[in-house]
Each structure stands twice: as structure tokens, then as C-alpha cells.
Amino acid sequence: MAKSDDHRDAATIPVTEFKGVGAAVAQKLARLGLETVQDVLFHLPLRYEDRSRVVPIGAVRSGQRVTVEGEVEHSETVFRGRRMLLCHVRETRSRCAPPRPPR
């Protein structure tokens, strides 16, 4: 966007004015209902999942959405109405061990 356009209403600025958004990308965004800068600013995720808190595998209960850390011992693709990836995971962190620093 040009400097003289800095104070335009976000509801009137088309997404094509974003760097890298041409006609093809604008068409894909339009399918999501995103046609203006304002649309993009207010496009929020369906839900927020906190992935910063790692839960021990033994503490996970059915139906919970959590982040676990472990080693995949075995994986397979199965078909049960739809294709699913099943993984057998072994816990690799002890409860007393401090979290590993990010790489």
C-alpha cells in the first residue's frame, strides 16, 4: 500500500493490495469469505489449542485435547470409515525431568 493510502478504511481495501496476493490467491481467500483487509483482521481460528503445556501420557483422559511428548514406537494407517493414522507412543520424559529447551 502506498503511503498516501495509510488512513483508508480497512473494510474498503481489497486483499489484492497485500504483497504476494494476486488474482489466484485472492480467489482462494474469497472462498473463505476474505475479500478485504478487515475480513483478514477479523478472521479468527475456530478454537485455540495451547500446545505449550506438555501433559504426561499417563495423565491423559479420553476426550481431552492435549500435547504429549514421546517416542513413536509403531505407526500404521487403518481404515475405519475413513483413513486414520494410529501411533503407539512411549513416554520419554520422567515426571521430575525439566522440560527440554526448544531447538
Image (tube, grey):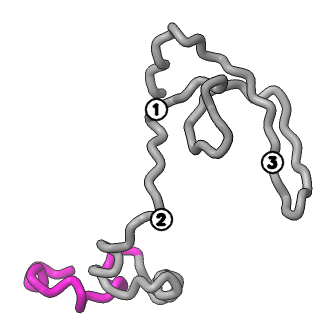
Residue at image location 52% in from the left, 86% down from the top: 31
Q: Amino acid at mark 3?
A: Leu
Q: Amino acid at mark 2?
A: Leu
Please tell me whether mark 2 or mark 3 is closer to you in this view: 2
Residue at image location 32% in from the left, 77% down from the top: 18
Expressed as whole percent of the image width and height from the top left, the position of residue 50 reads 45, 43
- Judge whether 7 appears above or below 91 on screen: below
Residue at image location 8% in from the left, 84% down from the top: 4
Q: Classify residue 24 as left or right of residue 39.
A: right
Task: Give the magenta part as a residue range.
Answer: 1-20
Q: Toward which corner of the image does residue 22 lie, by quadrant?
A: bottom left
Expressed as whole percent of the image width and height from the top left, the position of residue 96 reads 51, 8
Q: Earlier in the sequence, mark 3 or mark 1?
A: 1
**Mark 2 secondary-structure assignment:** loop
Between the C-alphas of marks 2 and 3, the distance is 23 Å
Label 1 sits on residue: 53
Does the magenta-highlighted stretch encompass residue 9?
Answer: yes
Expressed as whole percent of the image width and height from the top left, the position of residue 68 reads 60, 31
Q: Main secondary structure of the magenta part?
A: loop
Classed neighbour count for the residue bearing mark 2: other residues with Cα under 10 Å, few (<14), some (14–19), many (≥20): few
Q: Toward which corner of the image does residue 34 lie, by quadrant?
A: bottom left
**Mark 3 secondary-structure assignment:** strand
Please tell me whether mark 3 or mark 1 is closer to you in this view: 1
Label 2 sits on residue: 46
Does the magenta-highlighted stretch encompass residue 18?
Answer: yes
Q: Nearer the viewer, residue 78 or 1?
A: 78
Q: Amino acid at mark 1?
A: Arg
Q: Classify residue 89 as left or right of residue 51.
A: right
Label 3 sits on residue: 85
- Judge whether 16 appears above or below 43 on screen: below
The disc placed on residue 26 is none
- Judge whether 55 appears above or below 81 on screen: above
